[in-house]
């Protein structure tokens, strides 16, 4: 079996849906989505857009400035500016495809203040997670519009010929792979968090895709910047892994150490609201290192003084806590940082095309936009806006009409290799690529993963090789960045962070 499409999209998260929606609006027919699940999208609580009638005098320019500052000034200025300038169009795209956002009593759009932003600009739903709403309304509409959805499909290898993309190989329901041919392939396969074992990521985002892109010849960028969510629930069981929204700090929540001290005020006297995630992470890690952490390696967040109605407006969070015997009105919550998203990925130009002609990347699959850390809620905004801009870039670059000839399927699978190497790879990644990194640990990780890459037993299985390559590449990027910046902390190099954190004056 084989299939042919004009545009084949790997993934069905927000970035994929936005790309497909905008392609359809521009008249493209024969768009197909192949995906293993829904990725991180159903968990999105916050998504930022700067709307023209906002009450704060907020502008796309301020939004871009916040992004660059939160990224420790190494984000891509051109892509950040284009993203910020497209903010209203991204909002309108989602509205056209049926997404509704929560409103205040006076019918204005409800805006929350999340981490890293000067002004409240985060849109949401108060009855369900906005990401779940997006999937719920957009998928049926895209199907109605003729976009094909192929569920439970893993893209297992990219196909190239003469250095250009030609499609990908897919395994449906774990079955024998077949080839899908397309002159335009959009990587919308999300990030890499699960490479490190424990993370907030769902299981269908596995991180081998980074190695897959590299094997197809794609340039990658900023791989050292794995984002840690600062306030993930650490106890009681049943709540573990649930992020306490950073918007709670905008609602009046405070962070406490074991002395009951609001430690963030030492570096941010203006308060916790809007503090960038990397700053919160750093300060939490400092408190833990000073012996002022909680028994699980984090700190406490205090929401007890927040009105119950406000807490209930985050129902996924509030209900999960209450259902597990944890009442945020009555007790302090034990929270701490956990791998959560990725700011590295496939390097793209302003059309969101990689250096491999016809291979585009959107959402968390593309890198180099946010720099060393991203503002909260911006993964979702970027997923939307990169999808929109990519779809327009695809039309601009005129790559949709190339004929592609078929070839035999060439995919290697060996379950014994997976069983042998994958647990080892996860341990290597967790040890070397966690919160604190050091040159010697990274060198060991590079050499151990290289050993696996050179092992003929591992070479029998593409997934194992892709996974080993992903970890190897991230470790190399982390070794090359000889400083601590944003989400990347090198124990053996001075902390560049305080210098950059001075910029967060709002
Ligand atoms: C618990 C949690 C809460 C979050 N909250 C927020 C938030 O409030 N605001 C925010 O901005 N961001 C948030 N994020 C991050 C956000 O979810 C992601 O950055 C966002 O979903 C990225 O969108 P995407 O479409 O690029 O990738 P995803 O939504 O992750 O989708 C990836 C897609 O690719 C598919 N896929 C992966 N590998 C393959 C493969 N080999 N073959 C085929 N398909 C594949 C997956 O099944 C999925 O369909 C959160 C993440 C988590 C885990």
Image (spheres, helix red, strand yellow):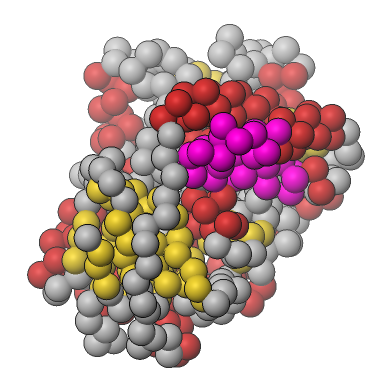
Q: Please identify the quarter of the rendering in which residue 458 is found.
A: top right
Classify 181 as above or below 250: below
Q: Is residue 17 visible?
A: no
Question: What are the residue bounds of the magenta stretch?
Answer: 451-478
Classify 311 as above or below 392: above
Along the viewing direction, whichever of 242 and 425 lies nearer the viewer? 425
User: Where residue 435 sits in the image (x, y, percent)?
Assistant: 67, 31
Classify 186 as above or below 469: below
Q: What residue lies at 66% left-to-right and 73% top-to-bottom?
A: 77
Q: What residue lies at 74% left-to-right and 26% top-to-bottom?
A: 286
User: Where residue 334 sits in the image (x, y, percent)?
Assistant: 50, 19
Locate residue 404 relative to residue 263 in the image: left or right.
Answer: left
Locate residue 144 relative to residue 38 in the image: left or right.
Answer: left
Assign the magenta stretch its main secondary structure. helix
Q: Quadrant of the C terminus?
A: bottom right
User: Where residue 296 sits in the image (x, y, percent)?
Assistant: 56, 13
Q: Please identify the quarter of the rendering in which residue 121 is found.
A: bottom left
Q: How many marks?
A: 0
Along the viewing direction, whichever of 372 and 119 lies nearer the viewer? 372
């Amino acid at each position: 079996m084989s299939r042919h499409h004009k545009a084949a999209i790997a993934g069905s998260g927000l970035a994929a849906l936005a790309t497909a929606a905008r392609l359809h609006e521009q008249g493209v027919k024969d768009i197909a989505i192949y995906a293993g699940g829904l990725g991180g999208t159903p968990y999105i609580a916050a998504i930022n857009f700067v709307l023209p009638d906002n009450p704060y005098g907020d502008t796309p320019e301020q939004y871009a400035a916040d992004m660059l500052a939160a990224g420790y000034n190494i984000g891509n200025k051109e892509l950040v500016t284009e993203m910020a300038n497209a903010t209203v169009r991204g909002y309108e795209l989602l509205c056209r495809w049926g997404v509704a956002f929560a409103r205040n009593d006076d019918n204005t759009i409800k805006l929350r203040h999340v981490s890293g932003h000067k002004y409240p600009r985060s849109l949401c739903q108060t009855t369900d997670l906005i990401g779940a709403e997006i999937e719920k309304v957009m998928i049926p509409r895209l199907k109605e519009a003729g976009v094909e959805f192929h569920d439970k499909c893993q893209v297992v290898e990219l196909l190239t010929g003469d250095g250009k993309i030609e499609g990908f190989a897919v395994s449906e329901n774990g079955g024998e792979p077949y080839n899908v041919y397309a002159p335009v392939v959009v990587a919308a396969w999300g990030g890499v968090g699960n490479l490190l074992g424990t993370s907030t990521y769902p299981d269908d985002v596995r991180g081998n895709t980074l190695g897959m892109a590299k094997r197809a010849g794609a340039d990658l960028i900023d791989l050292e910047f794995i984002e840690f969510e600062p306030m993930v629930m650490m106890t009681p069981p049943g709540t573990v892994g649930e992020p306490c929204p950073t918007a709670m700090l905008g609602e009046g929540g405070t962070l406490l150490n074991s002395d009951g001290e609001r430690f963030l005020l030492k570096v941010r006297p203006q308060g916790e609201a809007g503090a960038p995630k990397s700053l919160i992470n750093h300060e939490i890690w400092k408190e833990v290192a000073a012996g002022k952490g909680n028994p699980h390696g984090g700190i406490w967040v205090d929401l007890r003084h927040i009105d119950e109605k406000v807490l209930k407006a985050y129902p996924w969070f509030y209900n999960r806590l209450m259902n597990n015997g944890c009442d945020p009105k009555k007790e302090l919550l034990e929270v701490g940082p956990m791998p959560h998203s990725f700011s590295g990925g496939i390097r793209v130009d302003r059309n969101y095309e990689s250096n491999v002609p016809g291979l585009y990347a959107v959402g968390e699959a593309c890198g180099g936009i946010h720099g060393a850390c991203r503002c909260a809620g911006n993964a979702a905004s970027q997923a939307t806006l990169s999808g929109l801009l990519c779809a327009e870039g695809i039309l601009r670059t005129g790559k949709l009409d190339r004929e592609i000839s078929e070839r035999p399927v060439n995919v290697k699978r060996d379950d014994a290799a997976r069983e042998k190497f994958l647990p080892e790879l996860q341990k290597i990644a967790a040890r070397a690529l966690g919160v604190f990194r050091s040159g010697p640990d990274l060198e060991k990780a590079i050499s151990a993963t290289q050993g696996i890459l050179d092992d003929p037993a591992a070479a029998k299985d593409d997934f194992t090789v892709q996974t080993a390559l992903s970890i190897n590449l991230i470790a190399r990027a982390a070794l090359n960045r000889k400083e601590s910046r944003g989400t990347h902390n090198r124990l053996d190099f001075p902390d560049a962070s305080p210098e950059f954190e001075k910029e967060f004056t709002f």
